[in-house]
Amino acid sequence: MKDFTGSVAVVTGGASGIGLAMCQRFGQDGMKVVMADIVPERIEESVALLRGEGLEVTGVQCDVTKLESVEALAQATLDTYGAVHVVCNNAGIGPGGQLALWEYEEADWNWCLDVNVFGVAWGIKTFIPIMIAQGTEGHIVNTTSGNGGIAPMADTPIYSVSKAAVVTMTEALLLHLRTRKTKLGASVLFPGPGMLRTKLFEAWSTRPEEYAREEERTQGHFTYDDVEKIMRSANPDLEVTPLEEVADRVSNAIRDDQFWILPENPSSEETMRKRYESMRDRRNPDYFREWNLDVLD
Ligand SMILES: NC(=O)c1ccc[n+]([C@@H]2O[C@H](COP(=O)([O-])OP(=O)(O)OC[C@H]3O[C@@H](n4cnc5c(N)ncnc54)[C@H](O)[C@@H]3O)[C@@H](O)[C@H]2O)c1
């Protein structure tokens, strides 16, 4: 997709963090933007921010875990702008870390997989038929993470599982977009390469009641600062990546029809290589990185 001017982009999880940066960048690229998010106050604030910059943005409250809510988002998009060309399935949450895989409650699994996996599936199921019927060029970007998308990081196992699923789902999507000879492209976004200052670590504060845990967590939640400390103890050179840089990569990848939006980073390269070699040589995994929680004391 080379020409963005006058095209329409939909971004889920668009009212904060990486999604908001993508909305801003698409607006600057001359697109009309639909910012979809589950938290109405965030939508109101972020739409006002981007409109203040002279960008064409419409906010829509949407819960990506519900197919009918994503269908209503598509209808709102068509009612407002008449078409859709770019869809970023970006909404994501972490259900809280520091538990072993078998210690999570059913509600933790449901919340994380419903948002991070089914949210992407419902975006694909809803928007692709509309985009194919339109007959125009278009592009889908699904947000994964190096955490799971490359290999699981310690202490956030369900999140890792969900992000591994996003990579495979996007590969399958690309295969089908090609074999069905559509005019659509697909990309999978690994935000980074450094730390990203977003509200991801505060996801617990907007956890919907329907996914409430039966028992209070005793572990508390990592804050952004905790995670930065942990990561920096393993890699003192770790940088903070501006969100605009991530959005810039997404915009360029859509233009260049680039599938892997995977910025280079020595530690990810090493993990990818070790994981590949472990599979190739049928050796047990030696690429997991422990988290040093002592730095939080
Ligand atoms: N921040 C990081 O370090 C990082 C790293 C790799 C991948 N990611 C991924 O990037 C994406 C964006 O996250 P972020 O870091 O910008 O976090 P963020 O919390 O700032 O933004 C995520 C947005 O998704 C929204 N959301 C949550 N549940 C939703 C639902 N059911 N329906 C619609 N919207 C919903 C939230 O309200 C929030 O505004 C996520 O998929 C995340 O997993 C983030």
Image (tube, rainbow, N blue to C red):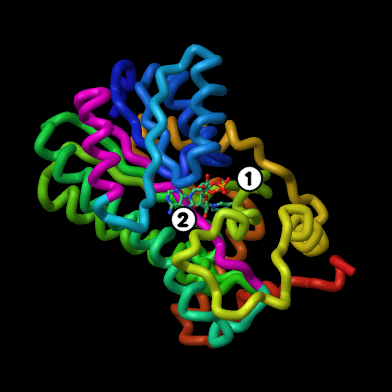
Residue at 31 percent across and 34 percent down: it is 86
The number of discs equals 2
Q: Nearer the viewer, residue 182 or 274?
A: 182
Tag 1's secondary structure? Answer: loop
What's the mark number on residue 114?
none
* Residue 14 in sight: yes
Mark 1 = which residue? 198
Residue at 46 percent across and 63 percent down: it is 163
Residue type beneath disc 1 = Thr
Residue type beneath disc 2 = Thr
Within-10-Å neighbours for mark 1: few <14, some 14–19, many 20+: some
Query: Can you give x and y, in whole percent of width and height, for residue 175 in the image?
Result: 22, 55
Mark 2 = which residue? 144
Residue 15 vs residue 97: left or right? left
Q: Nearer the viewer, residue 259 or 41?
A: 41
> Is the residue at mark 2 in contact range of ligand 1, meaning its CB lies under 8 Å from it?
yes
Query: Can you give x and y, in whole percent of width and height, for residue 262 in the image?
Result: 50, 49
**Whether residue 223 is situated above or below residue 105 in the rendered picture:** above
Query: Can you give x and y, in whole percent of width and height, for residue 84 in the image?
Result: 25, 31
